[in-house]
Image (tube, coloured by chain):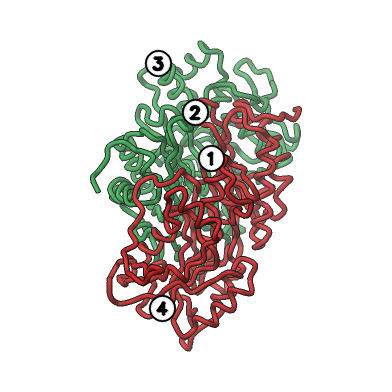
Chain colours: A green, B red
């Protein structure tokens, strides 16, 4: 069976062509493929995950995400890095050690095998960073008139002794973010619209488990993490995520415009295009609620990590303004931060 | 926020419209949504799964599948029933009790909410049959020119004390199938091509866990299941699946044409269209390898189940013809059954 450089519908029939594509493009480029007795190389109907039974005082955590992004490859990142990072981060914000990932690909007829290979390699690099195997997958093809770009679904399985919920914020908690907001969304928007407002703008998708693991190890007198809630502010930006965290916790959040890390280039681009940076999608970012007397300790641990150097305390949780988010502006006034509704900017995550 | 009857791109922005769609269409129609402390209703970044720690002598099993099927709704079934059944069956053939499912939807701009609701209800019915909760999910939208129909990805998490692998066949084993082959593929093909060759033909997608659980409970003197290998013959038909099982086990398989259950209407339609029923996709079917002296016992248990009434022994495993599948034809000659290659019939699973 000869190698083909373009995906065709024949790949989708469950025969030898698909087997060859999977072996030469997927299996070859994933370096860590087992979490138990049956791994990806066996190409069985699924995979198995073994883990230390003595740890079984917690719960398994599962999360799933489909990624649709155009273009699928963009400056300094691609849908592969985005998907693995996003799924790792969804496990991480729930306090779960990632155990394994799945990789389900949907390829349009005519998609270049070279591009697929780049995406697979990126998935592998991101998974390797946090030492998580990709253990099972699925590959389907669709005719070109039915789909115009690759779709990647990743599901993550993890394990947590203490589950962190996005509803966990308590009055008095500090709100921390691990770096500049709106980089990913603006980088992608500018790239797609072929606007070159700044060379500095790159997508910052990254798997945050190593960093989050280190802050979860900081525990209070009750032996539990001093982190009370976490959530990754992707679609809807930090405006959407903070509102969800406020609403679910039944508390209010007050953030300070002066304290929110925004690159000046991003700020300018947002101003020029009339976009609120609070509503722009992020990747590689996490909003963290922390018991207030541990704020500085958590901040200093975050700042030691590659993905946390620009961490900042951006606000606090209050028992007032229940379910609402308020912004203290640079001139000192207070305004509500609303939940973004509708399609504000082109799809970027 | 008013209800909308058509999916629009605004649903994809991560805001209130999407929240309303998920609440009114997805959450409302799933009846079993928790497997641990955090379930689907919480709409957290993922879900948790608790299970009996005393069972922890085995492994977690994970499987993923994306479903792309046109039309997404067809006589007596739809992509919803297909996806849940397929994922349950992938866990089941590995010997795993299903613990939880995920549901990731990709919706094209313009998709009818009414159709989505029907699909969600079908997912729920199939999941309820085997008592498996749908615990977490993801919903994305794509503009119409990028995607022309719904895509469903389901990932299943299970637990197995004894993993059954598709490589487990041993010389002497019997090969059993739980009913008529090629029903699903031909039903869909005829429906799509608007050919009405028979009113009898309907898709037979079904979640097989209850049936498979009962045959796994039959154990040999070593305390292990007498089932040696299982696999569901979807894409590539039983030709593809038997070849994979033969190759992986390092043994040969001889099947008897006379013994393979094919409805006469399906056989005629295949003849007319020049299609080999062995290569037609199935749903709701499983190929089972069994230690030979337990063949009748397993068969009688299968026949008691709704989805196993037409079960039949179709062949046996041999130490000869390693990695190959042979068909003993109705006239007594032997021929190789090849792995289907390329796109034989339109995509149907």
Callouts 1 and 3 in the same chain: no
Mark 2 neighbour class, 10 Å CA radius: few under 14, some 14 to 19, many 20 or more: some
Q: Mark 1 points at which residue?
A: B193
Are there few (<14), some (14-19), or many (20+) residues within 10 Å of tag 1?
few
Which of A61/B156 is in front? B156
Q: What element carries label 1?
A: loop
Disc 4 crowd, CA 10 A, few/some/many (<14, 14-19, 20+): many
Give the number of the disc on residue A194: 3
* Residue hosting label 2: B146
Q: How far apart are marks 1 and 3 (CA)?
A: 44 Å
Residue corresponding to mark 4: B173
Residue sticking out furthest to the left:
A2
Instruction: Kindly identify which numbered label has been placed on residue B97.
Output: none
* Mark pair 1, 2: CA separation: 24 Å
Q: Which of B132 and B80 is in front in this view?
A: B80
Label 1 with label 3: CB-CB less than 8 Å: no
> Are the residues at dot 2 and dot 4 in contact (C-beta closer than 8 Å)?
no
> Dot 3: what SS?
loop
Q: How dense is the environment of label 3, judged by Cα within 10 Å: few (below 14), some, or many (20 and up)?
A: few
């Amino acid at each position: 069976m000869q190698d083909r450089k373009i995906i065709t519908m024949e790949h989708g029939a469950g025969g030898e062509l698909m087997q060859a594509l999977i072996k030469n493009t997927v299996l070859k480029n994933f370096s860590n493929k087992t979490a138990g007795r049956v791994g990806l190389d066996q190409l069985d109907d699924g995979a198995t995950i073994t883990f230390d039974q003595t740890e079984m005082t917690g719960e398994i955590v599962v999360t799933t995400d489909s990624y649709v992004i155009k273009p699928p490859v963009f400056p300094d990142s691609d849908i592969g890095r985005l998907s693995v990072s996003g799924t790792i981060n969804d496990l991480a914000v729930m306090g779960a050690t990632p155990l394994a990932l799945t990789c389900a690909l949907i390829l349009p007829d005519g998609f270049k095998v070279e591009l697929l290979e780049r995406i697979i390699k990126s998935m592998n690099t991101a998974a390797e960073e946090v030492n998580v195997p990709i253990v099972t997958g699925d590959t389907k093809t669709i005719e070109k008139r039915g789909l115009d770009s690759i779709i990647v679904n990743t599901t993550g399985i993890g394990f947590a002794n203490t589950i962190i919920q996005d509803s966990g914020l308590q009055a008095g908690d500090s709100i921390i973010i691990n770096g500049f907001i709106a980089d990913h969304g603006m980088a992608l928007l500018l790239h797609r619209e072929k606007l070159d407002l700044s060379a500095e703008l790159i997508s910052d998708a990254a798997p945050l488990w190593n960093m989050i693991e280190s802050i979860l190890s900081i525990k209070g007198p009750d032996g539990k993490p001093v982190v009370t809630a976490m959530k990754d502010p992707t679609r809807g930006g930090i405006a959407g995520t903070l509102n969800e965290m406020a609403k679910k916790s039944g508390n209010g959040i007050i953030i300070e415009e002066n304290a929110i890390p925004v690159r000046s280039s991003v700020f300018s681009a947002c101003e020029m295009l009339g976009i609120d940076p609070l509503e722009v999608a992020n990747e590689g970012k996490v909003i963290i609620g922390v018991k207030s007397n541990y704020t500085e300790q958590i901040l200093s641990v975050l700042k030691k990590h590659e993905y946390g150097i620009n961490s900042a305390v951006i606000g606090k949780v209050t028992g007032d303004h229940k379910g609402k988010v308020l912004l203290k502006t640079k001139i000192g006034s207070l305004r509500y931060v609303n939940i973004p509704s509708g399609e504000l900017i082109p799809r970027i995550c």
